[in-house]
Image: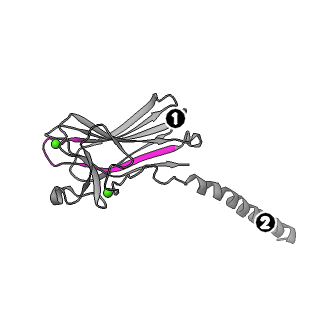
């Protein structure tokens, strides 16, 4: 092979490497995510700090209550209602959304469980997008009704016009009082 050809091949190889490294940083940037945007999502404040409740029955429950059957998923506390005999109940938190996140994926996740009875009550995780006038743009939810902690999650693209997101932890009564449990609630945006 002539010196000229060898030089051409070396230049071609160097250019390939240069192209690879110019693409690589963009790929890394797409994997960025915010920290948890919720206050006290894991209930570890031991109170409802950061949350608002539709009834006065919601509590951050310590693991000593209900003995071993109803332990937090993690830490010392989880959210539930106490002696709530209404049909449905909600604990919710609002989060403002910066314009730069419009069109990005937002993920709501939580560990959920219900009391072991037949029929079981229903635990529901819900996300609602609001515009600047406080009107609902769209709303999505996922339900769970087993007595074993399980992580459930919803990922949605943040719709155009979103100013605020509401995260709702909902309980629906099927048997006696409402027994819907929530822990490690998380809201993150990938950008
Ligand atoms: Ca916890
Ligand atoms: Ca019940």
Residue 147 locus on image (x, y percent): 20, 50
Image: 90 above or below 40: above
- Residue 24 part of the magenta segment: no
Residue 121 as seen in the image, left or right of residue 188: left
Front in this rendered view, residue 36 or 10? 36
Residue 88 locus on image (x, y percent): 24, 35
Image: 112 above or below 20: above
Residue 2 locus on image (x, y percent): 85, 71
Residue 89 sits in quarter: top left
Residue 151 as seen in the image, left or right of residue 179: right
Write down the region rendered in magenta: 105-122
State ligand 1's quadrant.
Answer: bottom left
Residue at image coords 18%, 56%:
65
Residue at image coords 52%, 36%:
163
Residue at image coords 13%, 46%:
117
Which tag is nearer the camera, tag 1 or tag 2?
1
Residue 109 as seen in the image, left or right of residue 122: right
| Beta carbon of the mark 1 residue lies under 8 A of ligand 1 | no
- Residue 115 part of the magenta segment: yes
Quadrant, the N terminus = bottom right
Residue at image coords 50%, 28%:
133
- Secondary structure state at the residue bearing disc 1: loop
Residue 87 sits in quarter: top left
Residue 91 locus on image (x, y percent): 32, 42
Magenta-highlighted stretch: main secondary structure?
strand
Image: 166 above or below 21: above
Give the residue number, with chain letter if any, for mark 1: 162
- Measure the alpha-carbon separation of dots 1 and 2: 52 Å
Give the residue number, with chain letter if any, for mark 2: 9
């Amino acid at each position: 092979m002539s010196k000229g050809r060898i030089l051409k091949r070396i230049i071609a190889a160097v250019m390939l490497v240069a192209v690879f490294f110019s693409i690589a940083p963009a790929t890394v940037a797409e994997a960025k995510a915010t920290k948890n945007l919720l206050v006290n999502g894991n209930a570890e404040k031991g109170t409802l700090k950061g949350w608002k409740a539709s009834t006065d029955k919601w509590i951050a429950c310590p693991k000593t209550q209900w003995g071993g059957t109803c332990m937090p998923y993690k830490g010392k506390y989880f959210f539930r209602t106490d002696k709530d005999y209404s049909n449905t109940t909600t604990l919710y938190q609002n989060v403002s959304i910066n314009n730069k996140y419009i069109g990005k994926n937002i993920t709501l996740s939580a560990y959920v469980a219900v009391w072991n009875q037949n029929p079981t009550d229903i635990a529901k995780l819900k996300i609602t997008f609001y515009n600047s006038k406080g009107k609902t743009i769209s709303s999505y939810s996922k339900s769970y009704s087993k007595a074993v902690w399980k992580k459930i999650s919803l990922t949605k693209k943040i719709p155009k016009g979103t100013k605020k997101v509401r995260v709702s932890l909902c309980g629906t009564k099927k048997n006696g009082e409402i027994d819907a449990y929530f822990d490690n609630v998380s809201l993150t945006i990938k950008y």
